């Protein structure tokens, strides 16, 4: 008889005996469910965060920042730099014939969150050309803000996260009251904040400089021409980035931190599950010592015994992984999650993907294999003579 | 008749912590084909160790063990397992049936090591259960059978692959007198009618009375009590 047939036969007998060992089997299933549940939930969050940031960038747009600035918050652009940008080649034109450039200024305001406490929300002052540069921004309720008036439009995700952001509500910015006159959607990170007229915002905050300039290119290929023209003047001290490149940088920074957290948390839990699997399978092997020795006495080889124990552990771990992933999907799938710092809060929807489930199953197989191998080897080394002395 | 078991000058010991315990001391034994041999002796005398060597479950430290024409002391663990599957049927004191399997599935287990078709396996399982008088209990799990019935299933399992040698370790040690007698009568039938060579370890003189020959193991050597000399 081939080794495979033996393995199949012994594994079948092993699996049939699982209901007799439900308690220790559950330890493996529940342990692995916890690991994969956490891994999938955090992984989905990290992925959704990255997707949201990356979707904010467009190949047709470029962003100009102060040299060395890693984000718009830490950037300022001089009026001289703005003038150079406006006259640079490769920039699309609005129907009115203006350069398709929005010069933005970003400030943060702390607002009460729906689940209690305060959270930072970004208020982005934009030029009138902003809606031509970023056509994905769409007014879904109310009307557009009027330049010169203390008016704002609010993103739908910001509304979900914070109290009192309905059309007609008022918020206080730098000792002045601003009225929310509309609601917009954009499907990206802008939807987590406010938009207002940049000149009105600059005036309210008594500043003279904007944070960044976002340019709509005539085509993605026009970027090099634009960059060359803007960076030709060394006194401007600016950098030009393709928008996806800028948001990828933003995303990678946050994702790197979250990935470390995920790895540490899931790693500790996986170690726990591994020890649980080891303990459970050592117990299972010990409980079934007579059966295993009987099979060995009858003539079954050690390969069948080793593989059957490994298959059982891995199967239980995979069942746990599926339960964990299903629980994470039921509890967090489609949920709105917010992540913020002192400057802004990003609100996004968690999405479960098949790749995350795949990672969970691979991890479960790995934990099952490592947790099952030492007990499997012990099982295969049980002296067959034990069967004759068993009580 | 030819010797089916030939053991020469066998030494076997075990380590218990730092202590070495010698169990068999240069033991010789021949078992003829078709014999029903009962090995008796006090606890710790070495009779189970001897049975394990005959059944290929263990190897001697020194000496020759030839069973069914094979030098067992020279075989690797894997080859020894294959040899056991082909040549030996085991009957244990506590039956050692697999609790999750029905009687017929338990009996079928040794046949899973052969190339027989499912149909042929089924036929042989039915024949074995018929022989031990349990054809009507084929679908029952071990927990649904009495001790005597479980031992009959175990005997059917030992027989199903048609081995030349049956190795029985206290086959009636867990059974009442009446059931013991029926099991021993079954073993006697298998020996007399079906030509199976049987080596049985037992404490029970009455059980040993069913055998065609009785040997006593004492302090690691064979003793013929009636003759008072080494066998």
Image (cartoon, grey):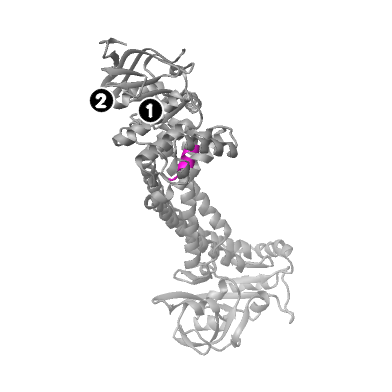
Residue at the image position 49 percent from the left and 81 percent from the top: A205
Residue at the image position 46 percent from the left and 87 percent from the top: A176
Residue A241 lies within the magenta run: no
Q: Can you see residue B92? A: no
Start and end of the magenta stretch?
B100-108
Residue A87 picture location, percent across and down = 70, 72
Residue under label 1, please give it: B168
Instruction: Using the rendered view, name the quadrant where residue B46 is placed.
Output: top left
Principal secondary structure, stretch drawn in magenta: helix
The residues bearing labels 2 and 1 have C-alpha atoms spaced at a distance of 16 Å
In this rendered view, identify the residue nearer to me: A355 or A193.
A355
Residue A171 picture location, percent across and down = 47, 85
Q: Can you see residue A64? A: yes
In this rendered view, identify the residue nearer to me: A134 or A234.
A134
In this rendered view, identify the residue nearer to me: A284 or A27.
A284
Residue B27 picture location, percent across and down = 33, 13
Residue A163 picture location, percent across and down = 45, 82
Of badges 2 and 1, the one in the foreground is 1
Mark 1 falls within which chain?
B
In the rendered image, the quadrant that contains the N terminus of chain A is top right
Q: Which mark is residue B43?
A: 2
In this rendered view, identify the residue nearer to me: B111 or A70.
B111
Mark 2 falls within which chain?
B
Residue B104 lies within the magenta run: yes
Decide if residue B25 is on the left or right side of residue A252: left
């Amino acid at each position: 008889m081939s080794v495979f047939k033996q393995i199949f036969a012994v594994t079948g007998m092993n699996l049939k005996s699982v209901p007799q060992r439900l308690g220790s089997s559950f330890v493996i299933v529940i342990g692995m469910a916890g690991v994969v549940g956490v891994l999938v939930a955090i992984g989905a969050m990290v992925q959704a965060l990255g997707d949201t940031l990356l979707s904010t960038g467009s190949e047709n747009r470029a962003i100009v920042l102060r040299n060395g600035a890693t984000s718009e918050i830490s950037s300022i652009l001089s009026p001289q730099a703005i003038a150079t940008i406006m006259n640079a080649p490769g920039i699309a034109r609005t129907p009115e014939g203006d350069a398709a450039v929005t010069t933005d200024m970003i400030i943060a305001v702390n607002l009460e969150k729906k689940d209690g406490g305060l959270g930072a929300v970004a208020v982005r002052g934009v030029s009138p050309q902003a809606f031509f540069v970023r056509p994905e921004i769409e007014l879904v309720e109310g009307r557009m803000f009027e330049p010169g008036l203390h008016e704002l439009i609010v993103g739908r995700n910001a509304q979900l996260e914070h109290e009192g952001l309905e059309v007609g509500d008022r918020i206080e910015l730098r000792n002045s009251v601003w009225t929310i006159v509309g609601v917009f959607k954009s499907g990206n990170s802008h939807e987590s904040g406010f938009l207002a007229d940049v000149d009105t915002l600059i005036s309210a905050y008594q500043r003279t400089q904007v944070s960044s300039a976002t340019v709509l290119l005539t085509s993605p290929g026009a970027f090099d021409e634009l960059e060359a023209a803007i960076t030709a003047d060394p006194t401007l001290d600016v950098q030009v980035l393709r928008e996806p490149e800028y948001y990828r940088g933003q995303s990678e920074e946050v994702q790197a931190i979250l990935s470390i957290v995920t790895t540490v948390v899931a790693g500790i839990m996986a170690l726990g599950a591994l020890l649980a699997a080891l303990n459970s399978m050592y117990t299972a092997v010990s409980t079934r010592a007579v059966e295993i020795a009987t099979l060995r006495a009858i003539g079954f080889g050690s390969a069948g015994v080793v593989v059957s124990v490994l298959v059982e552990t891995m199967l239980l771990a995979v069942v746990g992984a599926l339960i964990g992933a299903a629980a994470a999907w039921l509890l967090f799938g489609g949920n709105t999650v917010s992540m913020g710092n002192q400057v802004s809060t990003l609100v996004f929807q968690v999405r479960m993907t098949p790749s995350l489930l795949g990672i969970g199953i691979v991890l479960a197989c790995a934990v099952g294999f490592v947790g099952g191998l030492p007990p499997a080897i012990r099982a295969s080394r049980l002296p067959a003579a034990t069967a004759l002395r068993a009580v | 008749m030819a010797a089916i078991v030939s053991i020469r000058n066998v030494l076997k010991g075990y380590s218990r912590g730092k202590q070495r315990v010698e169990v068999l001391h240069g033991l010789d034994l021949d078992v003829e084909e078709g014999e029903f041999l009962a090995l008796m002796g006090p606890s710790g005398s070495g009779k189970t160790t001897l049975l394990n060597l005959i059944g290929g479950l263990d190897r001697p430290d020194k000496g020759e063990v030839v069973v069914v024409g094979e030098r067992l002391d020279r075989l690797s663990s894997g080859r020894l397992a294959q040899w056991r599957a082909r040549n030996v049927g085991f009957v244990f004191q506590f039956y050692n049936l697999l609790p999750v399997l029905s009687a017929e599935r338990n009996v079928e287990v040794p046949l899973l090591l052969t190339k027989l078709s499912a149909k042929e396996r089924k036929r042989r399982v039915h024949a074995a259960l018929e022989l031990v008088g349990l054809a009507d209990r084929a679908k029952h799990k071990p927990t649904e059978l009495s001790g005597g019935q479980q031992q009959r299933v175990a005997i059917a399992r030992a027989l199903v692959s048609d081995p030349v040698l049956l190795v029985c370790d206290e086959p009636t040690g867990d059974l009442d007198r009446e059931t013991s007698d029926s099991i021993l009568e079954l073993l006697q039938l298998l020996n007399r009618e079906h030509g199976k060579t049987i080596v049985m370890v037992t404490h029970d003189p009455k059980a040993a009375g069913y055998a065609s020959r009785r040997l006593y193991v004492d302090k690691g050597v064979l003793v013929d009590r009636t003759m008072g000399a080494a066998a």
